[in-house]
Image: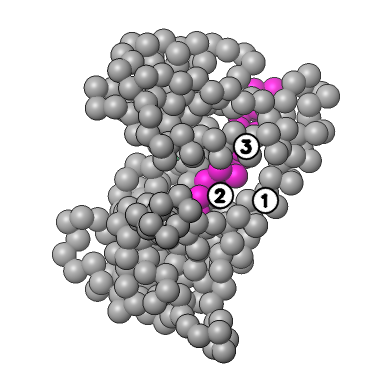
Amino acid sequence: MTDKEVQQFVILDGKKTSREIEVEIAEETRKLVPVVGRPPHLAAILVGEDIASRTYVKSKFKACKRVGFKDTLVTFDASVSQETILGKVAVFNNDPGLDGYIVQLPLPDHISVEIVTDHIDPKKDVDGFTPANFGKMGLPDPSLLPATSRGIMELLARYDIDTRGKHCVVVGYSHIVGSPVSILLAGPGKATVTVCHIYTKDLAFHTRQADILVVAVGKPNLITCDMVKDGVVIVDVGINRIPDSSAKRGYVIKGDVDFENVADKCSHITPVPGGVGPMTIASLLLNTLDAYKRAHQF
Ligand code: GUN
């Protein structure tokens, strides 16, 4: 697109929206702290040296500080045993001064994500990954929702994008994003949902049908302009580090969508970075606030 052309599409600005949500959270927190006697408290377990995981956790704790939450980080070497992690999980489950915690993924291969997740107290599961919370997501009275999916639904709602009756195509079926967001879109979102994944035969056939396209694969430029229809709403969940020697950090962050060539066909599109990522963090804070309020009978 040249400078002279008028930008037709609306950017779904996750950074701005998440900051608005943070202001609301900070306001509510300020009112509740004198009543409860302490602020909401979020903890994270971080295993190994994965740079991206460290960056994500750092961003989550910076956000905690902005809204007045207490935060606690527990780190382990990549060689830590599963028993040690389960021991920490048990300590966190039994700590009345802690409202919610996450185990940052990925974990080293010798530690089972399923076993660790299964031991997290659902009341403190602010990632919304435990079987109890995941299962309740499809019931009339859900509990803590998976954070990224909650963030996507919140972002669409705050831009007045009605999902009811729309055809939503979700690409990717991970338990972190693709699977839960498809459930939320089809359930509370009242959308017609198509889920695509690695075995889908003609991906472009399906993506071209989408009124709303959610892409959560982790493959840069997976979605090109010939794969979408005019007026589509695109939510790009991908976070891919592309080596770039001209960039200050030696890499740039790109989503799964070829933004430069696709955006002009969209009515709305999330940028990467600054789209879904900040909304995941805002949802983590919302879940922590919900857990805190429930623990104190609000
Ligand atoms: N790794 C990538 N995304 C997430 C997330 O939302 N939560 C956790 N715990 N780990 C992640």
Q: Which residue is mark 3?
A: 62
Amino acid at dot 2: Pro
Q: Which residue is mark 2?
A: 278
* Mark 3 residue element: helix
Q: Is residue 193 left or right of residue 32?
A: left
Q: Is residue 201 left or right of residue 250?
A: left
Check contact, mark 1 vs mark 3: CB within 8 A.
no
Identify the residue shown where x is 69% and y is 45%.
22
Q: Residue 175: horizontal and vertical position, in percent?
A: 34, 42
Check contact, mark 1 vs mark 2: CB within 8 A.
yes
Amino acid at dot 1: Arg
Report if residue 167 is visible in the image: no
Identify the residue shown where x is 38% and y is 29%.
49
Q: Which residue is mark 1?
A: 19
Q: Main secondary structure of the magenta part?
A: helix
Identify the residue shown where x is 78% and y is 19%.
37
- Residue 283 lies in the magenta-colored region: yes
Dot 1 crowding, Cα within 10 Å, few <14, some 14–19, many 20+? some
Residue placed most toward the observer, 282 or 96: 282
**Magenta highlight range:** 276-296
Amino acid at dot 3: Lys
Residue placed most toward the observer, 85 or 29: 85
Residue 62 in the image: above or below residue 110: below
Outermost bottom residue: 4
